[in-house]
Image (tube, rainbow, N blue to C red):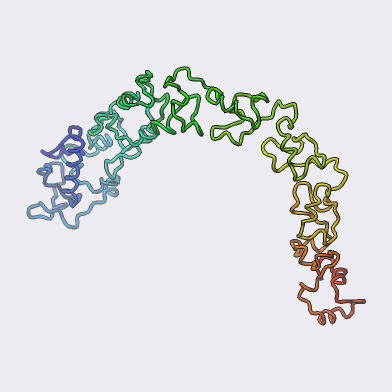
Amino acid sequence: MDASAHGRTGWRAAALSAAAFALVLACTMQARRDVPPQGWWAERGPVVPHDSFPADCSLCHAGGDWRDIKSDFSFDHLAETGVALEGRHSQAECLRCHNDRGPVAQFARRGCAGCHEDVHRGQLGQSCETCHGQLDWRPQGQIAEHNRTRFPLVGAHAATACWRCHEGAQVGNFSRADIECITCHAADLKTAQNPDHLAQGWVDRCDRCHIPTSWGGGGFNHGTWPLTGKHAAADCADCHVGMVYAGTPDQCVDCHLSEYNNTNDPDHMALGISTDCKDCHNTSSWEGANFPHTGIVSGCLMCHQAEYNNTTSPDHQATGIGTDCESCHSTNTWQGAQFKHTGITNGCAMCHQSDYDNTTNPDHVAAGFPTNCEACHTTNSWFGANFNHSFPITTGKHKNFDCADCHLNPSNYMQFSCTHCHEHNQSKMADKHSEVNNYTWSSPACYSCHPNGKE
């Protein structure tokens, strides 16, 4: 904020250190806190001459010593001049702009530079509003603006003080800075011991391995061999023997040959399984490998004879289920097999007698249900059986009833009851059906006349 045009106490912000500038600005704001726009801060010195002001002093002054401005003095700047005073401009003393240094329009045409000295020495352009607003000089959005340069501020760089790279930033000097990492991180290079960067000859281009988020851990860019899963927690020396980094092998088996040789479930060596571990395994765990079965021509039993022999649900050997496991199973898991029932001629009970015997909702044995399970069930699941029931059970309000809601005798599903549930009175119904031939108070009679559950 340049006040040199107003008197003897002007200063240049660019000549101050950051601490001095902040102190002066704070004192200035404190001293001027109660000075109205039509007033004047005495510390600036005498008011400038009024040679170009209107001759009628009473327009502004109260009279007497002419030091006091009229208490009812007001001026609608927007209405009178067409220029709105916003933010801190609405609080500035009138004489800061309207004085004898020249016509105010002359300086207004220059924009911010008409009143405010460019402490950035022209290095950041003339558009002050890119970083500054009218409320105060504190810059805003400088991170986004910096991203337009050759060096976007991301990660830890976004939280770094400007002066760490721009030495004159305290006084607004943002001269071009070197973007090479080593310019700022020479000290980090000297102290980097795990591994010893200087011994390895790594003296420049930090960005080949590091990213701005962090020097180590998840921030380390391991290049063509990303450190994920268990590899992320491994020590450098686990792979770089003797801390020699040039020519380090980059195949799984180079580190995991012993695991390959000793694996017997299945025996990798005997079966000739590839030594490219990542074909089946991931970096999180050896367990849960997803083996790609492409190229297997000798049948599943070469590896899975024990699983076939020991399976009891159903007993594969006893029921004569084929040994071509892939006809029912996938290569992801044994569970959830989709058995193809094509060719089954001896009925479902050959495999599912225990399921039939143990079913209690409803009790198939007690109710005398047939063992041709496919009449109600599908081959995908026992649950959700679709019993071919006549009306009204499958429609309307009866649609979601449980079997036991109507079939009260679990040992005889030929019997059902309507009268135990519906709010009918036997004598009342007898009167209502007095003209119905052969009317009887019984559920079969109800159903014979009301097959869809309606009157």
User: Left or right: 128 with respect to 103?
Assistant: right
- Write down the quadrant of residue 18 in the picture: top left
**The C terminus: image quadrant:** bottom right
Q: Is residue 302 above or below residue 62?
A: above
**The N terminus: image quadrant:** top left
Residue found at x 67% / y 39%: 333
Instruction: From the viewer's side, name the closer residue of 90 and 142.
Output: 142
Q: Is residue 427 above or below residue 358?
A: below
Instruction: From the viewer's side, name the closer residue of 133 and 438.
Output: 438
- Write down the quadrant of residue 300 in the picture: top right
Instruction: From the viewer's side, name the closer residue of 351 and 219.
Output: 351
Whether residue 118 is visible, yes or no, is no
Whole-percent x, y for residue 275 in the image: 60, 24
Question: In the displayed image of the protein, which residue is found farthest to the right?
Answer: 437
Residue found at x 46% / y 30%: 234
Residue found at x 84% / y 71%: 443
Whole-percent x, y for residue 38 in the image: 18, 50
Badge count: 0
Whole-percent x, y for residue 255 in the image: 52, 24
Q: Is residue 223 above or below residue 288?
A: above
Whole-percent x, y for residue 410 in the image: 80, 65
Whether residue 127 is visible, yes or no, is yes
Residue found at x 78% / y 43%: 315
User: Left or right: 351 with respect to 190?
Assistant: right
Instruction: From the viewer's side, name the closer residue of 306 and 81.
Output: 306
